[in-house]
Amino acid sequence: MKYFLTLLLTILPLFGLTVTYNTAQEGGRPYGMLHIKHDSPIPCMVTDLELNKKRYTCTFENTLVSPPTPKKTPLMDISFLQRENEFDIIVTPAFKSQLLNMDVPLHGSKEVPLLSTNDASHWVILIYEDLPFAQKSSEDGINFPIYYPELIRPYVGALDLNGAPISYIRSRDINAYLDMKSAYESGQYERVMDDAQEAMMLYPQTIFRSEFALYRLRAMDKLLDDEERSIHLKIDNNDIVNEGKVWMKSFPSDEYMPEALFYIAKHYLKMGFASDANYFLDILITEHPQHRFTKWGILLYADSLYNSTKRAEALRLYTDVLYSAQDLDMASEAAIRLAQNSIDVGKVDEARDYLIKILNANRGFLLKDEQSAYGLAQKLALNGLEGIAAQITQALLEGRARVNTLYEPLLKDTGLWYAAAKEVAKAHTYLSRYQEQFSQGQYEEEVQEGLDKLFFELSETNSTKLEAYYDTLRERYDNEISQKAVVEKIKLLTKEERYLEALNLDPVVREMAEGTLKEEGMEALSQAALLRGNEAIEEDQCKEAVALMERYGVGERLDNRQKVYECLMRLSRYENAINEAQKYIQERDLRERLSWMENLNRALFENEQFEEVVLLSDDIYNLGILVKDRASRSVLRKKALALLNLKRDDEALEVARKLQEELPNAYENIEIYDKIIKYAKSIGSDLLINEYATMALKLQENSQVFYYSPEIEYAAIGARERLGRVEEALEVAMPLPQRLHDATKRIQAFYRLGELHYKLGRLREAREAFESCAAMEVQSPWRQMCQDHIVLTEN
């Protein structure tokens, strides 16, 4: 007997905790004892695993800054899990084990307690392949090797079918059969295969001969299904076929005949002998139509068809098995094949329906082979079925220890796939759990990115936090996450009415690659531009408003249409103003219609579309009469100006006279009169000049606005002089010097005044005018002329 001691964990002063591990050997078999001691009682929980194995979790109400690293020994794995306010020690033995409460005194009980649900300050976990110091293992305690032969009572052993005792020699086949059955159930297929062959040699007359041969077939089938293990075997598919045929001949009426037929057909198919396989499948289907192995055989045959040119026939067989199988596992297997086919042909909705049925009705079957289940989940995720994939990996995670090699990728994928399926709460739970359990994990960056993407779906309402996190994402990534952060920040700033800040992100959005995110970003900018545009319009910030309209195309959506029109006109966007006005010239409200017709006329005129102005002016004039809007008669000015620009002078004069009749006192008429005066000069008509100059002078006098001086006055003076009406010309010239504030214009006015006085023989008045002119400190030829003419007034 050999002992040796290994110290796994020294005393932790923060906890008052000591963990010590002792190992030894008994009869060449190792065993170990793990001692967990604490200053105060602690709970230890037992979890049953497969193959009679267990896991132990002892929990301490405390925290560690840095948990110890996991340990692995031949007999067990030990890991440490830090949770929010608790610390776990997790022990996973590789063999059989028992939990012993060492606080219970041995002398207080007839048996050594193996398990206690109470807390204890000293626990021992006994780990062994064969229970040491015991004749046999017991479920209730350690059976020490103390024998009392005199107390053993006589008993009758096994009985045969006739009730007669079976001799000790012949009963060994029973034990062989039971051992073989147990070995098969525990997955020891090579041992079963060899033991079955040996048993048939040792017990040629045994009543279990058919069972031995069948278990050998079963074990061979399992081994050949495992590609990695089958490489090293001395058997092949042909061996199963041959031994299966021998079994059929030897036991033709055995109830397990369908199973043997199945193995033969299956391995014929594996060898590519479809016709031979079909022969045995025909027997199965004909003689045992509802047997579970018949259904399995049909599935295998359908698999071979699916990979050939007869996929439609394969799908028919899968469907037949799905709806005819009495075995839930069988139906589930068919449903999986149909789901995989649906994925292959792009019918993901059908695949989802099949898999949901399995998850709801027979989840355990789907998860029986965790590697296959995980592979199926990965395929589902790749084909847009992330929600179903996540349900599968979530189920695989349940009851799985953190030390399991699949635990970390399963946890990662569950979170990411739930995120892809828009199941936000579940995704956040699993991704956060990954970060808690694997702070330096293999998929740390991928999980962080998943959480960052998920942030956009969470219902965070704190604007300050949101804005800060968006900025963090922009710095952290240079991909769609940073782009999404920009878009969401624009939306946030817009919601907070910080429109200009939102619009400052315009260059970032425009640099994005074409796609959904850029479209969403431009839409967010457009919304900010619309809201800011409305503000700018109301604030009379036309330049900004028009810039937003032109950059983001929001002009059609702004609220105040009249102000939009005015801004367009102010910034000489006449084409746009015309388009804007044309939308409303058919309004049902005639006054509204008239107003927009006038707007349109104005825009047309500024855009030099004079023919349209002439035509529209008549419509405006007539509609103004209809609605009794006297102000609309001013449209005659636009018509007259348009006609003058079109060189239709006679028509323009006619409109001007009508304008003078309709609106004789309107100061704005001067613009028309001024243009007619220029026209009259071009044709040398002093009478026409004098007529319209006189009307213009009267309007200026009435309004005391002398915008057109001195040109109007000089036109009137010149015409009257040429007509010999010098006295009338003098009347126009008398007030002119006082109206002019520009010295260069005023000096000329004095000269013209002096000249007119001189022509009328009023030498004193002429001299006064010339002297006023000469006295002005202005460099002008008029000054010299005034000085020269002073002498003419002397007599």
Image (cartoon, grey):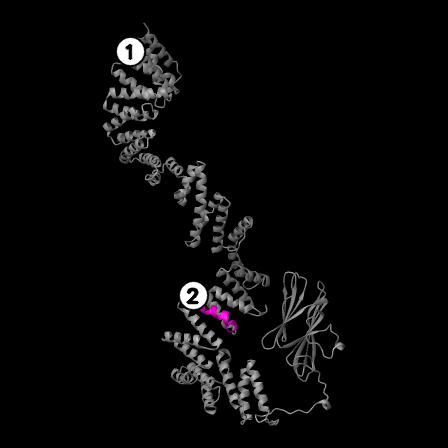
Q: Which mark is residue 783?
A: none
Whether residue 349 appears in magenta in the rendering, the answer is yes
Q: Position of residue 721 (x, y in %)?
A: 27, 15
In this view, 663 is above or below 255:
above
Residue under the image location 76 percent in, 76 percent down:
108
Q: Quadrant of residue 698?
A: top left
Residue under the image location 59 percent in, 74 percent down:
49
What is the crowding at mark 1: few (fewer than 14 residues within 10 Å), some, or many (at least 20)?
A: few
Could you tell me which secondary element the residue under label 2 belongs to? helix
Left or right of residue 376, residue 19 in this image: right
| Kind of residue indicated by mark 1 | Lys
Instruction: Give the mark, 1 or 2, whose residue is nearer the N terminus.
Output: 2
Depth order, front residue of 618/450: 618
Residue range of the region highlighted in magenta in the rendering: 348-367
What is the crowding at mark 2: few (fewer than 14 residues within 10 Å), some, or many (at least 20)?
A: few
Residue that label 2 marks: 349
| Kind of residue indicated by mark 2 | Asp
Left or right of residue 11, residue 163 in this image: left
Q: Locate the N terminus and report the quarter of the image it occupies.
A: bottom right
In this view, 88 is above or below 170:
above
Residue that label 1 marks: 759
Whether residue 394 appears in magenta in the rendering, the answer is no
Q: Quadrant of residue 733?
A: top left
Left or right of residue 707, residue 440 in this image: right
